[in-house]
Image (cartoon, rainbow, N blue to C red):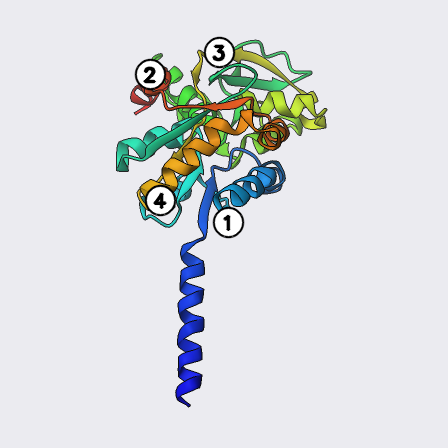
Amino acid sequence: MRGIFLSLFLLSFLATAEAKEELIFLISPMTSPISTLTKFHPLVDYLEKRLGKRIKLKQKKTYKAVNELLKEGKAHFAHLCTGGYLMGRKEFNIELLAIPVIKGKKTYRAYIITHQKASYRSIEDLKGTVFAFTDPLSLTGHLFIKAYLKQRAQKPEEYFKKFFFTGSHEKSIEAVALGLAQGATIDGLVYEEMMEYDNPYAKRVKVIYKSQEFGMPPFVVSASLSQRDKIRLLRLLLNMHKDPEGKEVLKKIGIDRFDPPDHSLYRTAWEVINKAE
């Protein structure tokens, strides 16, 4: 009997130790769950191999839910949209880890789209129409337009006939392509990537406005990640493009390389968020 209890204790201890070696990686729902899992699976495999730890990729339905898990220490690191990152930094001091460089740039834009066959040519033309947003915390998918309208003494609920949140930039593009909305504000990166892959929905919409440039959606860490693991993760990301295998993974996920934190990149995004409040 004593041997059985000892065995059970050892199994429990080993299970606990193993669980501690698992890192939770969150991604804001900028794209659909299937697209996210498909795209970032190679990165998860690469980091698991190099860190010697299991990495569990998770995606929640809203940006707020992602931030809550980081705030509560239930996730270790994440790839956040810029709006989600800045709100997290404001509310619970989330830490910037690394910035993806995509096609030589560390910035991106919000795109205003409408149907390819529509006559709308400006944001002003979309007044009184049905409009699609992505998520309340999304910079390019909501806060940008909210700030744009506020500067003109307007509110979304007054400006548009109706608006709704789709949950991802992909879904917003689909909503416009299918005629569920006459316009949408989206992440330009998502649109450009969908166009590269000849996505039929992306081909049925057109861009009628591009915003100023904002700091790229970053990789961040929560307080639950140990200092040792944070340093190891940062070094891995910063050196991936120098490693043949890492370079191949970066190519698959559409990133040139990762650069160190640079808070100055997010000044324009901060301005938009402050105007939107």
Residue 122 visible here: yes
Which is in the foreground here, disc 4 or disc 2? Answer: 4
Which is in the foreground here, disc 3 or disc 1? Answer: 1
Q: Kindly give the residue lying farthest to the top in the view shown.
A: 121
Q: Which residue is mark 1?
A: 56
Residue 148 pos. (x, y %): 39, 15
What numbered label is drawn on residue 264?
A: 2
Pointer 3 or 1: first along the chain: 1
Residue 131 pos. (x, y %): 52, 26
What numbered label is drawn on residue 225?
A: 4
Residue 277 pos. (x, y %): 30, 25
Pointer 1 or 4: first along the chain: 1
- Within 10 Å of disc 3 (Cα), the crowding (few <14, some 14-19, many 20+) is few
Which SS class for mark 1?
strand
Report if the CB atoms under discs 2 and 3 are less than 8 Å apart: no
Q: CA distance from mark 2 to mark 3?
A: 31 Å
Q: CA distance from mark 3 to mark 4?
A: 46 Å
At label 3, which amino acid type do we have?
A: Glu
Quick one: 117 or 83, which is closer to the camera? 83
Quick one: 113 or 22, which is closer to the camera? 22
Q: Residue at x 41, y 61 (%)?
A: 17
Quick one: 157 or 31, which is closer to the camera? 31
Q: CA distance from mark 4 to mark 2?
A: 24 Å
Pointer 2 or 3: first along the chain: 3
